[in-house]
Image: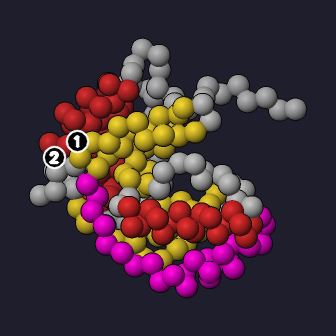
Amino acid sequence: MKRNNAPQQTHFIGVLLPEDITLTLEDCRRYMNEAYGCKSGHGTPIHVTLVPPFRLPEDYTTDDLISAIEKEVLPQGLGFTAHIDNFDAFGDRTLFANVIADENWTKLRDKTIQAIINACPGCTKKDKKPFQPHATVANRDIPTGVMTKAIQVMNELNLAENFPVDNITIFERKGNRWEAGITLEIPMY
């Protein structure tokens, strides 16, 4: 048996979606569970990830992350209106609500990652790939060969919604689950 010696990730940073979109996407998760047995990630609140999961070194606390975001990100007034346009997938691995990428998302992601790195050097790094915001419906345990059908079913919902990007949420691992630890309001200018 292969043993994973990597330290467990403790935090990630994201944007929680509004309740109406959350309820729709939770219905989509239920469908994927009932139709295909998908469970991976279904305990995590519906969100768009800004900073992927990382391990916060013991020298730092969630309060350090809060302070960094409050000082370096929130005063910049980076709130904006985003748009979801139906569903898409990353290969056969991840089915998601397609959040349209734009410079507002990239700027919010970049400023948030930099604030986290400044507060807790070495805990994470910026991904070199272009940022593709998305709200995951199912991942990792999607059976082979079902993605095309699953996307067709999801796209029948014709999900096209604008929503406010008005929060940055720090998620914390509690046992085997991710929970929204604290949500900070982004000023909308």
Amino acid type of disc 1?
Val
Q: Quadrant of residue 20?
A: bottom left
- Check if residue 69 falls in the magenta segment: no
Magenta segment boundaries in residue numbering? 142-166
Which x, y percent locates residue 45? 48, 51
Task: Look at mark 1 in the image and give the residue it sits on.
Answer: 73
Check if mark 1's residue and mark 2's residue have beta carbons within 8 Å.
yes
- Whether residue 128 is visible to the viewer of this picture, yes or no, is no
Residue at left offset 51%, top offset 66%: 25
Q: Going by the picture, which residue comes out furthest to the top?
A: 59
- Residue 87, position as x, y percentages in the image: 52, 74
| Amino acid type of the residue that numbered disc 2 sits on in the rendered structure | Gln
Please report the residue visible at 26 percent of the width from the left and 36 percent of the height from the top: 69
Give percent across and percent down for residue 32.
66, 67
Q: Quadrant of the C terminus?
A: bottom left
Image quarter of residue 131: bottom left
The answer to whether any part of residue 187 appears in the image is yes
Q: Which residue is drawn at 66% across and 52% down?
A: 40
Q: In this view, does 5 lie above or below 110?
A: above
Find residue 47 and report its horizontal and vertical position in percent.
44, 54
Q: Nearer the viewer, residue 36 or 71?
A: 36
Give the side of residue 66 with respect to residue 39, left or right: left
Considering the numbered disc 2 on the image, is that residue within a helix, a strand or a loop? helix
